[in-house]
Image: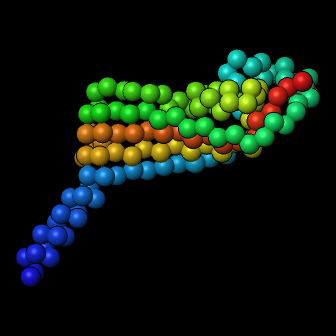
Amino acid sequence: MQKAMTELFFCLLVALLMVAGCSSEGTLGMVTKSSADTTSILKSGWAYKEIGPVRAQSCMHSPFGIAVLGDSDFATVVEEALKTVDGDALLYVTASHSLRGLGYLFTIYAITCTTVEGVAIKFE
């Protein structure tokens, strides 16, 4: 009986070491499209119309640490979120980044995802 319990414990320990992950989250006041002239927007005090809440996520997959498929870049995710509502910027932004993987130090398969949420606005 004790040998079976030891083997079960060892199997669970190996399984936990095989699947791992971590994440981080932060907030920002305003994020604009990468093509926007933010200096002139802020100096001139442009009026804007609030469109509503948006959310976008993009993931990058890396099998065996060799190939990289997808794009989890923050700017890419912001552009995707704004594209869904034809917005120019996001207010009250929450950004999170997660890394999940299978295998010791994510060598078998790794997934990195970036998620952006906020209120989309359109400059007038």
Of residue 24 and residue 88, the one placed in the foreground of this image is 88
The answer, for residue 91, to whether it is visible in the render is no
Residue 104 placed where, x, y %? 25, 46
Q: Where, by quadrant of the figure, is residue 107 drawn? A: top left
Q: Is residue 20 left or right of residue 51?
A: left
6 versus 117 height, above or below = below
> In the rendered image, which quarter contains the C terminus?
top right
Q: Is residue 17 left or right of residue 32?
A: left
Badge count = 0
The answer, for residue 20, to whether it is visible in the render is yes
Residue 23 placed where, x, y %? 48, 49
**The furthest residue to the front:** 84
Q: Residue at x 23, y 64 (%)?
A: 12
Q: Residue at x 30, y 39 (%)?
A: 109
Q: Where, by quadrant of the figure, is residue 75 drawn? A: top right
Q: Where, by quadrant of the figure, is residue 56 drawn? A: top right
Q: Residue at x 68, y 26 (%)?
A: 83
> In the rendered image, which quarter contains the N terminus?
bottom left
Residue 66 placed where, x, y %? 28, 27
**The furthest residue to the bottom:** 1
7 versus 18 height, above or below = below
Q: Residue at x 39, y 50 (%)?
A: 21
87 versus 35 height, above or below = below
Q: What colouring does the structure picture have?
A: rainbow
Residue 101 placed where, x, y %? 34, 45
